Image: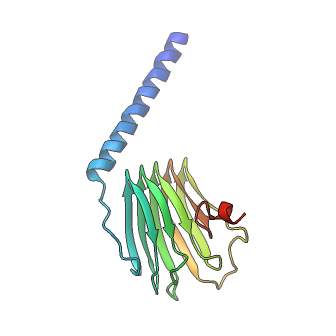
């Protein structure tokens, strides 16, 4: 009885390690490399594969773009960006990675993400503003990773306390 259970658990653990190694190799070999982005760009394409992401947008009409984090992560700061009047859509894809999304307190954030052993959370103290506020739509997938939404960069709330 215990022999079968031990073999089954061993096979499951071996399969997990094979999956992890395969995912890391795939991310490293097939993953896109990060190109420096202009902080004034209205559309962004940010990548953090096995690396750190630090981006501060000053766009005058931010429309969105994509952020990919595989085994990496960091901070995407949109506090100095102005949303396009039609709103913006940001596609977030995270696998064993993620980050912090910093937005102005008066932005409305709508989330439509698929989460697998990961997630996304909004930690702004006042929550989401009512409909009619500038709207940022988040779409995408998180797999063993996630994103946090706040109005302050991580660590700022400690510095002001």
Name the quarter where the C terminus is drawn. bottom right
Relative horizontal placement of residue 39, taking residue 151 as reference (left or right): left
Q: Is residue 62 visible?
A: yes
Q: How many marks?
A: 0
Seen from the viewer's position, the closer of residues 24 and 52 is: 52
Q: Position of residue 88 (x, y in %)?
A: 49, 79
| Coloring scheme used | rainbow
Q: Is residue 110 above or below residue 134?
A: above
In the image, what residue occupies the spot 60% across and 76% down? 104
Q: Position of residue 35 (x, y in %)?
A: 30, 66
Outermost residue, left side: 29
Q: x and y percent of residue 141 in the render? A: 48, 58
Camera-nearest residue between 26 and 49:
49
Task: Name the residue furthest bottom.
Answer: 85
With respect to residue 58, does 5 lie above or below?
above
The quadrant the N terminus occupies is: top right
Q: Is residue 106 left or right of residue 54?
A: right
Residue in view at x 50 percent, y 47 percent: 144
Residue 44 is left or right of residue 161, and the answer is: left
Q: Report the side of 63 relative to 159 (left or right).
A: left
Q: Is residue 1 visible?
A: no
- Image point 56% across, 69% down: which residue? 102
């Amino acid at each position: 009885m215990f022999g079968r259970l031990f073999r089954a658990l061993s096979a499951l653990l071996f399969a997990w390690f094979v999956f992890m190694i395969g995912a890391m190799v795939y991310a490293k070999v097939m993953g896109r490399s990060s190109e420096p982005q202009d902080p004034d760009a209205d559309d962004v394409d940010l990548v953090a594969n096995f690396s750190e992401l630090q981006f501060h947008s000053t766009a005058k009409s931010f429309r969105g773009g994509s952020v990919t984090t595989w085994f990496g992560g960091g901070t995407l700061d949109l506090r100095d960006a102005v949303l396009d009047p039609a709103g913006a859509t940001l596609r977030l894809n995270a696998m064993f990675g993620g980050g912090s999304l910093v937005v102005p307190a008066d932005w409305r954030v709508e989330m439509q993400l698929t989460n697998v052993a990961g997630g996304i959370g909004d930690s702004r103290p006042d929550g989401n503003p009512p409909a009619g506020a500038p709207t940022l739509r988040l779409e995408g997938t998180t797999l063993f990773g996630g994103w946090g939404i706040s109005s302050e960069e991580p660590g700022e709330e400690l510095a002001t306390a």
